[in-house]
Image: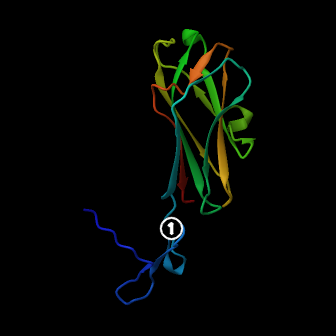
Amino acid sequence: MASILNVDQINNAAGTSGIAFDASTGKASFPNGATLPAGSVLQVVRAGWSSAATTSSTSLVNTGRSATITPTSVNSKVLILLTFGYYASNGLSDYLISTFFRNGTDIGQGGYPSMMLNRLGYTDSNYTQTVTGSLYDSPATTSTVVYDWYVRTSNGSSITYGDARMANSITLMEIAG
């Protein structure tokens, strides 16, 4: 049987400088404004799915896949990790280009989509690969941030992404700034 300890605050041996816990969120607050050092992971959010979709568009289209996070500091960064199953009907002659929109704004580098996802080796409708990509963002807010995943093809061939036989997810990691 597991043990559970419920507390509102943990104090040091002198009875001061306690770590308090917010009753509604369970998040800890540190005494005297203490914070975790830069580079620490503050929270992780994951959104997964198991259904596939197909596109042959050479213009960016919203995949309908997204993840939402509320940063705890305006100095925080968000590391976006993308993993999905993927195959193309046209072998190696086409590839998927992918980007994320933060609250409706494309955060791809220099106006070009942020992630060019090219297959490694032979790919057809009978062979699906898992593809990963990442993007580092500075949302500069403590308001809720929605990251929507957009894709397009390089030359208009039919590409299926989010294959149900693979692990598909968007993971957001808030990193202390």
In the picture of the structure, the residue carrying the numbered disc 1 is: 27
Tell me where residue 127 appears, x and y as whole percent: 45, 15
Q: Residues within 10 Å of mark 1 (few under 14, many from 20)?
A: few
Q: Nearer the viewer, residue 148 or 105?
A: 148
Residue drawn where x is 61% and y is 58% of the image? 71
Residue drawn where x is 54% and y is 69% of the image? 24
Q: What residue type is labelled 1?
A: Lys
Q: In which quarter of the image is the C terminus?
A: bottom right
Give the answer, above or below, for where 91 lies relative to 154.
above
Instruction: Report the side of 118 relative to 102 (left or right).
Output: left
Pick out the residue farthest to the left. Answer: 1
Tell me where residue 21 appears, x and y as whole percent: 48, 74
Tag 1 secondary structure? loop
Q: Nearer the viewer, residue 23 or 19?
A: 23
Count up the numbered dots. Answer: 1
Image quadrant where residue 62 sits: top right
Instruction: Report the side of 5 relative to 40 (left or right).
Output: left
Instruction: Report the side of 7 relative to 177 (left or right).
Output: left
Q: In which quarter of the image is the N terminus?
A: bottom left
The colour scheme applied to this rendered structure is rainbow
Give the answer, above or below, for where 174 lies relative to 131.
below
Pick out the residue farthest to the bottom. Answer: 14
Tell me where residue 126 appears, x and y as whole percent: 47, 12
Give the answer, above or below, for where 77 lies relative to 114.
below
Tell me where residue 72 appears, x and y as whole percent: 59, 63
Image quadrant where residue 135 sits: top right
Residue drawn where x is 72% and y is 28% of the image? 60
